[in-house]
Image (cartoon, rainbow, N blue to C red):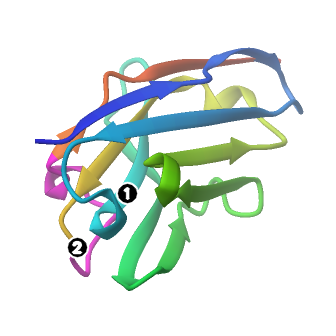
Amino acid sequence: QVHLVESGGGLVQAGGSLRLSCVASGGTFSTYDMGWFRQAPGKEREFVAALKWSSGSIYYADYADSVKGRFTMSRDNAKNTVYLRMNSLKAEDTAVYYCAAKFPGRTFDKAELYNYWGQGTQVTVSS
């Protein structure tokens, strides 16, 4: 069983930055695909970013088109932590952001494939 805890959300003005963190406990963290999703009020949960485990310490990153060039996902296996650095934030980035983990696989942008989820952290961007 993997337990995920997000932090770092908050209120920020448009154009500002935030860094979200997600600490994992349990399981073999280094081999999990890790993802960030978000859900705005009245909308479905959507993919934001993922780091897909390849082999050893090699990971591949992928991002939703809406955040490419603005968001960067990273991980520190020594700390069992993944991060989401969000720059140039826009009002439409406002949502609850969730960290998720799954066993390695080819697909990593589908929420239903993830096995473990954090409780979420609220990000609000004021325009």
In the rendered structure, find residue 104 and report the number of the disc placed on it. 2
Residue at the spot of label 1: 34
Quarter placement of the N terminus: top left
Residue 52 position in % (x across, y down): 39, 72
Residue 9 position in % (x across, y down): 61, 20
Classified by dominant secondary structure, the portion drawn in magenta counts as loop
Q: Earlier in the sequence, mark 1 or mark 2?
A: 1
Q: Separation of disc 1 and disc 2 at Cα?
A: 9 Å
Is residue 85 found left or right of 95 in the rendered image? right
Residue 109 among those drawn in magenta: yes
The residue lying toward the viewer, choosing from 41 and 9, is 9
Q: For mark 1, does the 10 Å Cα neighbourhood hold few (<14), some (14 to 19), or many (20 or more) residues?
A: many
The outermost residue toward the front is 78
Q: Residue at x 43, y 36 (%)?
A: 23
In the figure, residue 85 lies in which quadrant?
A: top right
Q: Bounds of the magenta span?
A: 105-115
Q: Is 118 situated above or below 83?
A: above
Is residue 102 found left or right of 24 in the rendered image? left
Amino acid of disc 2: Pro
